[in-house]
């Protein structure tokens, strides 16, 4: 983390993509330079390299590896974090990070084109994302899964979700049969997975042949202070990490679509709790070809209560920084004239 704080320089490798309808983004570095609009980015393998990543790098500075959980990336800490956050989640957190417009934009690549599709919403929480899914798919065909009963209690109260199946479960060990679902959706959940590769491998397993996974999550900051707090709080993957995880799991036609609140004007240097929508298609029936070892975190093992409390407090304090960021960006949007960089 100290290295991340000291090394504030950015070195971005940009590939022009296809700008999607709706939100467009302008990249900016720490020196105020601006980069062309970026949108949908596709990635494919080639014969010379195992992975050809066409997604732009958020930053080339060193960071903690994804396999080393942040404080609230531990499942037990995340459980209690949402015990309290569930009280205000829909009314305080979502308006700053995950709006209805963003949700609809992010779900578009999932191709929810048939009301009879079987859809699993993994890490569905209060059902905010599920509300976007049931616009296109019959609620009786949708399952919401989350480890937090407090979040799921909020989902159960939403009238459009009354016919959905709502279950408690672990995103890294899904209680669904292999080749079960037509669509896998997960929004705002990967940041709490101790082993994101395992969660994406599970997404591959539960999908049918030709099924599509749509994972919506954060992007890593390039601003030094935001990098520091993200490395304390929870997982903020880089865009190329998403691509690599999907391709290693066996997905084909992997694509990234950038999203963000409109008042950010495309600024992504602080990272975004909901920053991109990643999709991939399952090309063959059965389990993922990727072989993994034991799970990174065993929730059945006892934890040191002092260490638990310390991680919980430090993680929650770091999370407060990202509650303030959208307010800061909204104020800048109001103050800085349109057309000028913020």
Image: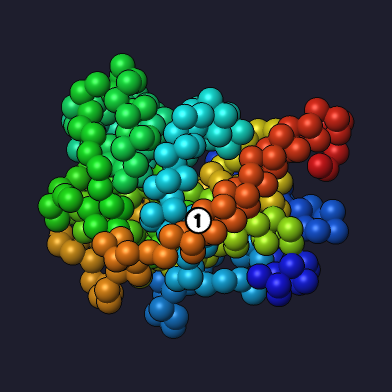
313 vs 38, nearest the viewer = 313
Which element is circle 1 on? helix
Query: Going by the picture, which residue comes out furthest to the left?
Result: 177
Residue positioned 76% across, 53% down in the render: 28
Quadrant for the N terminus in the image: bottom right
Image vertical order of residue 191 relative to residue 187, above or below: below
Residue positioned 44% across, 80% down in the render: 49
Quadrant of the rendered image containing residue 113: top left
Image vertical order of residue 99 relative to residue 200, above or below: above
Coloration mode: rainbow
Q: Is residue 24 visible?
A: no
Query: Going by the picture, which residue comes out furthest to the front?
Result: 306
240 vs 9, nearest the viewer = 9
Q: Position of residue 153 (x, y in %)?
A: 32, 29
Residue positioned 41% across, 78% down in the render: 50
Q: Is residue 184 visible?
A: yes
Q: Position of residue 284 (x, y in %)?
A: 19, 61
Circle 1 packing at 10 Å, graded few (<14), some (14-19), many (20+), is few
Residue positioned 57% across, 29% down in the render: 92
Quadrant for the C terminus in the image: top right
Q: Position of residue 264 (x, y in %)?
A: 70, 38
Q: Position of residue 9 (x, y in %)?
A: 78, 68
Name the residue that disc number 1 marks: 309
What is the tally of numbered marks visible in this picture?
1
266 vs 332, nearest the viewer = 332
Query: Going by the picture, which residue comes out furthest to the top?
Result: 159
Query: Going by the picture, which residue comes out furthest to the bottom?
Result: 48
């Amino acid at each position: 983390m100290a290295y991340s704080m000291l090394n504030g320089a950015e070195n971005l490798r940009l590939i022009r993509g296809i700008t999607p309808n709706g939100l467009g983004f302008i990249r900016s570095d720490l020196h105020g330079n601006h980069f062309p609009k970026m949108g949908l980015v596709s990635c494919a393998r080639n014969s010379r390299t195992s992975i050809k990543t066409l997604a732009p790098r958020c930053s080339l500075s060193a960071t903690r590896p994804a396999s080393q959980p942040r404080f609230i990336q531990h499942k037990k800490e995340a459980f209690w974090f949402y015990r309290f956050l569930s009280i205000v989640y829909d009314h305080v957190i979502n308006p700053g990070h995950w709006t209805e417009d963003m949700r609809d934009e992010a779900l578009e690549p999932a191709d929810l084109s048939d009301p009879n599709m079987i859809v699993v919403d993994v890490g569905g929480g209060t059902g905010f994302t599920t509300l976007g899914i049931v616009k296109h798919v019959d609620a009786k065909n949708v399952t919401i899964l989350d480890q937090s009963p407090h979040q799921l209690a909020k989902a159960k109260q939403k009238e459009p979700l009354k016919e959905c199946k709502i279950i408690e479960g672990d995103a890294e060990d899904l209680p669904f049969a292999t080749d079960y679902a037509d669509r896998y959706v997960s929004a705002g959940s990967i940041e709490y997975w101790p082993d994101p590769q395992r969660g994406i491998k599970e997404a591959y397993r539960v999908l049918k042949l030709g099924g599509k996974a749509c994972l919506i999550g954060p992007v890593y900051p390039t601003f030094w202070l935001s990098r520091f707090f993200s490395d304390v709080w929870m997982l903020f993957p880089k865009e190329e990490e998403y691509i690599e995880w999907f391709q290693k799991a066996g997905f084909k036609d992997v694509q990234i679509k950038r999203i963000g609140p409109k008042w950010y004007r495309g600024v992504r240097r602080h990272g975004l709790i909901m920053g991109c929508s990643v999709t991939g298609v399952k090309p063959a029936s059965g389990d993922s070809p990727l072989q993994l070892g034991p799970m990174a975190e065993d929730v059945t093992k006892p934890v040191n209560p002092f260490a638990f409390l310390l991680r919980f407090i430090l993680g929650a304090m770091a999370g407060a920084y990202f509650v303030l960021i959208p307010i800061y960006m909204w104020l800048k949007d109001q103050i800085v004239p349109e057309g000028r960089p913020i």
